[in-house]
Amino acid sequence: MKSWAPLILIGGVLLGAAGFSWSQHLEGSGEVVAARVELDGIEVGGMTADEVRNVVASHAEQVLSQTITMEVDGGKARFRLEDLGFRYSQRATVGNIMESRRDGGPLAQMLSWFTTPFIVSSADVSWALDADKAREVIAGAPELTPTPAIEPAVVTNARGNLKTRPGVPGVMVDVEQLLGRVRQLDPLEVPTTLTAGLVPLAPTVSDDAAQGVADELTDLTATGILTSLSGRSVRLSPEQLRSQLVVLAVDGEVQVSFDIEGLQQGIENLYVDPVRPLKRPAFEVADGDPRLLEKGKPPMVCCAIGSAELVATTVLSGEAEPFVAVPLEARAEDDPVVIAWTDGSLIVDQVSSFTTPHACCETRVENIHRMADIVDDYYLLPGESLSLNEYVGPRTEENGFVPAGAIRRGHLILEVGGGVSQFATTIFNAAYFAGLDFDEYRSHTIYFSRYPYGREATISNPAPDLIIRNTTPYPVLIDTSYTDTSITVSMYSTKHAVVTELEQRVSRRGACTHVETDRQRSYPDGRAIVDTFLADYRPAEGIDCSGNRIPRPD
């Protein structure tokens, strides 16, 4: 008996230890992971549920970020597993880990626990594949479509007629073949490359369907469309309409619309003249200070926003009638530059002022004052020209002018409106120093000392005329004022150019004197432009440049 005692004692100790270990295993159920449990080679035995969740989250990110390369006919595309539609259920995987060695009946659990020292238990990863997404991703990868199909197109030819350009088949990867190989993947053992063959790729729209749309659009645009705006009617031709059509074959459908922006521009090109002209602002000048009395208004132009949509809808709905106009509405010009022209905000500086003297109380002074009154407060827009002959009109007694001295064919004569060339010279010099241009001017043929030598202008009916052009970016307000012995023309705008008179050259041309005067205009951008003004003076009244006497006009 004494020889068995140590063995019995050892056996009792081992049995007690095993019992204790088994009880600990049972007590840890649901709280910690059983011993010798792994997740894809990661030891998780003895971890708490929170620790397991962290491990699974990191593992899921690692697995789903793996990439697969798909290759076809030289084209390669790489996809992350997650983007391809693989899903990793972290919650289910955590459950698998926590239940490892603890699932099944008591006997199964005892057996699993008993083999712990000898066998590692690998917990399953719970994952799934969204096959529909995988199919969509594969089919949508341009790298796997070596030759895309070309859809049929409806186009406008050089004559403005609609025609169909046939579609062209292409080839793409065999999606179902690749999808079958993706289904067989184990996310824990991802291969580097999957390959598949090619299959034909047909256009989604047939040529017949495209031709049917072309025929229908030809009928809808056959007569163009009549439009009307403020009592005026203009027709957009079939060619104009067809040039703005947008016909697209997309996902098995032919979509028809208009390029609304292009169609709007096409309509506006038909109505180029303003529906209502620009209304100029009104000013009053006192002591050299221009004061705005009333703002102007931008012109009303074609066409209101939505005009192109209205025309497009009418055409495509088949509601257009050959002789019934689609009514359009005008809109106020919204160009901020034009708005600034009309609101008077650009009249801020006196850019020039010029005065010429005359004797008091002569009849010619009445004509000078009359012309000054007509031109006073004229508002010259950028790009516009002011013709004195056209704006003032005929110098007749009915228009307020009286007989006075004038030059006609080199002779001083008496005629209605005589003397107004002094106003022409005065406004010429004001425009000269304001940096404006001249479409037409001519000096007197006889020099008068009250005018700047070589820098003056005359005017007569029907010619010569004085035409001033505003080539600056800003409107110019022309203000006239006079006394009994002088006439003044001032111009107000936004200072734009610095005007400097350069040299003057005097030469002989036969018996006449030829004068050239250079003007320089310096601009804010650094440009400096020099132009030259010409004047030719006869040697005396009634004598031409050859020294011959000129017959006096009847």
Image (cartoon, rainbow, N blue to C red):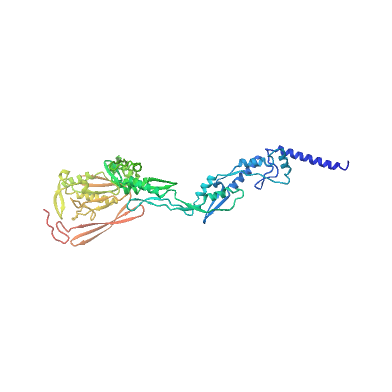
Instruction: Pick the quarter of the image with the N terminus.
Output: top right
Residue 252 visible in the displayed image: yes
Residue at figure coordinates x 71%, y 46% from the top left: 119
**Percent of width and height locating residue 123:** 66, 44
Residue at figure coordinates x 21%, y 48% from the top left: 390
Please state which of residues 184 and 470 is positioned toward the viewer in this rendering: 184
Residue lying farthest front?
A: 208
Q: Is residue 356 left or right of residue 333?
A: left
**Percent of width and height locating residue 71:** 54, 54
**Percent of width and height locating residue 256:** 39, 45
Residue 344: quarter of image: top left
294 versus 210 height, above or below:
above
Please state which of residues 239 and 439 is positioned toward the viewer in this rendering: 239
520 versus 366 height, above or below:
below
Q: Is residue 124 left or right of residue 131?
A: right
Please state which of residues 276 and 481 is positioned toward the viewer in this rendering: 276
Q: Is residue 311 left or right of residue 65?
A: left
Total marks shown come to 0
Residue 47: quarter of image: top right
Residue lying farthest top?
A: 27
Residue 362 visible in the displayed image: no
Residue lying farthest left?
A: 554
Residue at figure coordinates x 15%, y 50% from the top left: 405
